[in-house]
Image: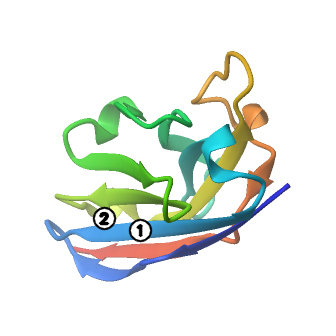
Amino acid sequence: QVQLVESGGGVVQAGGSLRLSCVASGRTFNTSAMGWFRQAPGKEREFVAAIHRSGGNGYYRDSMKGRFTISRDNAKNTVYLEMNSLQPEDTAVYYCAAALENGIVVLDRQEEYDDWGQGTQVTVSS
């Protein structure tokens, strides 16, 4: 099991940037693929970005490509989400999640992820 704690959310104006962090404890961090998901008021939780346990290129929801960047530092047990050019429609609670990666993991499927953080609120004002 992995315990996840997100931070870095807040209120930002449209066009601004935020960097979210998620610190993991428990299971060895580099055995987990890590993902970011978000849930806006009245909407289903949706995939944002994910990264394999070894790092490398991230995977993104189409609407985030070019604006968001996911990265991880296995030495610090931390995954990051750099968000640029934020828009009001990006307002949501952002969740970090971990998926034990001992085979093929479909990174954009919520069902793949076993452990979830409590979320951090991101509010983008127009």
Up the image or down, 72 lies above or below 14; here it is: above
Residue 83 at x, y percent in the picture: 28, 59
Q: Earlier in the sequence, mark 1 or mark 2?
A: 1
Residue tagged by mark 1? 20
Residue 123 at x, y percent in the picture: 39, 75
What residue appears at the point 22 percent right and 47 percent down from the top-left corner? 67
Q: Residue 31: in sight, yes or no?
A: yes
Total marks drawn?
Answer: 2
> Of helix, strand and loop, which one carries label 2?
helix
Q: Residue 32: in sight, yes or no?
A: no
Up the image or down, 25 lies above or below 43; here it is: below
> Of helix, strand and loop, which one carries label 1?
strand
Q: Amino acid at mark 2?
A: Pro
Distance from Cα at disc 1 to Cα at disc 2? 17 Å
Classify residue 78 as left or right of residue 26.
Answer: left
Q: Nearer the viewer, residue 98 or 31?
A: 31
Q: Amino acid at mark 1?
A: Leu
Classify residue 43 as left or right of residue 73.
Answer: right
Classify residue 65 as left or right of residue 3.
Answer: left
Up the image or down, 40 lies above or below 112; here it is: below
Marks 1 & 2, CB-CB < 8 Å contact: no
Residue tagged by mark 2? 88
Nearest to viewer (mark 1 / mark 2): 1
Q: Nearer the viewer, residue 5 or 29?
A: 29
What residue appears at the point 37 percent right and 47 percent down from the top-left corner? 70
Quadrant in which the C terminus appears: bottom left
